[in-house]
Image (cartoon, rainbow, N blue to C red):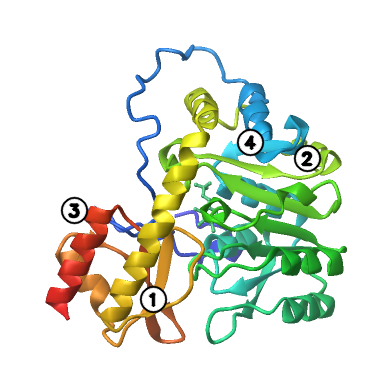
Amino acid sequence: MIELKRSVRNLKPYFVNQVPYRVKMDANETKNYLLSQEPLLEKIEANIYPDSDATILRQKLAGYYGCKPNNIMVGNGSSDMINLVINGFCETDDSVLSFTPSFSMYENYCVMAGAKLVKLECNADFSVDITSLVDKAKEIKPKIVIICNPNNPTGYYIEKRDVIEAIEELKDSIIILDEAYIDFGGESCVDLINQYDNLIAMRTLSKAFGLAALRVGCMIANEAMINRIWAIKFPYNLNALSQYYGAMALDRAYEVAGFVEEIATQRERLSEKLKSLNFEVYPSKANFLFVKHNRQDLFELLSERGILIRKMPINSITYYRISVGSEKENKILIKELEEIL
Ligand SMILES: *Cc1c(COP(=O)(O)O)cnc(C)c1O
């Protein structure tokens, strides 16, 4: 058997819980039925390669994010774009700095690139200190610093002035600012791309737009940066269906605002309910809640009852990440938890 290269042999495949379910609250997906009535393929020339430059989609994204199409590169989810930046910039043994816990895939991309991910612990309450991030960066001189805001899995939101402080202080590193959840109420830093040439913001239609299946994500940065990265972009890297329906979704972006508001309302209600069931609930600006409970077996017990949440072991304590569902779904979760507890 021919083995994978040594540096990647210890990587674990990304965990996806493939069991039957009634309520799915484990992957931060959101249902807003934005395009649920659209017929597939009618508008697509399936025999022709898609627009490699995704011209129309990038125009619409630029309109939505308030930048120029030349500030944007799209890819197969923003994960794909994060991977491209890490692989494009990191030499073997370069370091990448991020907080922990954060998005688990950063580690895989770094390992694939031969880079080393240095993980700076969040505070005990899962808030983060920009000063300690800056100090650590000055010590280890990372090629890239990744800031996930709001952070997955903790939901913690860093104020814009603090993100700016990091960008200002770390001019010798590329800052990947992962804003996958920023549409749920945080303040984006996309407007700063022309001010800071080390800033790359990552955005996606997978979360607030509720289009995870389409895999439309992008990076947003100053034109010189995007042009540089264009050299390593694979041709036709986003399929025609995703480009077409992604663009259509952006035409209806005004519908997303109400939906986001509803999620925020449901999140606060769910948070109160969980607290009344003795959960410790950390403040979240995203579409999920990060929680802790004395009972360490809730993932398994809920799973048996058809409810999927995510379990997150950190320093031998099991935390849970629960995606905020519809009012009905959240009620089912609470009812099952009341029975279990
Ligand atoms: C969901 C998520 C993404 C991106 O998802 P894509 O579907 O690849 O666009 C990126 N970062 C974080 C932290 C996420 O949770």
Distance from label 1 to label 4 (Cα)? Answer: 33 Å
**Helix, strand or loop for disc 1:** strand
Q: Is residue 124 left or right of residue 61?
A: left
Q: Residue 226: which numbered mark, if any?
A: 2
User: Residue at point 71% right, 54% down?
Assistant: 189
Q: Is residue 38 left or right of residue 115?
A: left
Name above or below for residue 321 compared with residue 29. Answer: below
- Tag 3: amino acid: Arg
Could you tell me residue 113's position as x and y percent?
67, 57
- Tag 4: amino acid: Tyr
Distance from label 3 to label 4 (Cα)? Answer: 34 Å
Distance from label 1 to label 2 (Cα)? Answer: 38 Å
Residue 94's image quarter?
bottom right
**Badge 4: few (under 14), some or many (20 or more) residues near its Cα, within 10 Å?**
few
**Helix, strand or loop for disc 4:** helix
- Residue under numbered circle 4: 64
**Helix, strand or loop for disc 3:** loop
- Tag 2: amino acid: Ile
Foreground: disc 2 or disc 3 = 3
- First in residue order: circle 1 vs circle 4: 4
Distance from label 2 to label 3 (Cα)? Answer: 42 Å
- Residue under numbered circle 3: 22
User: Residue at point 74% right, 49% down?
Assistant: 88
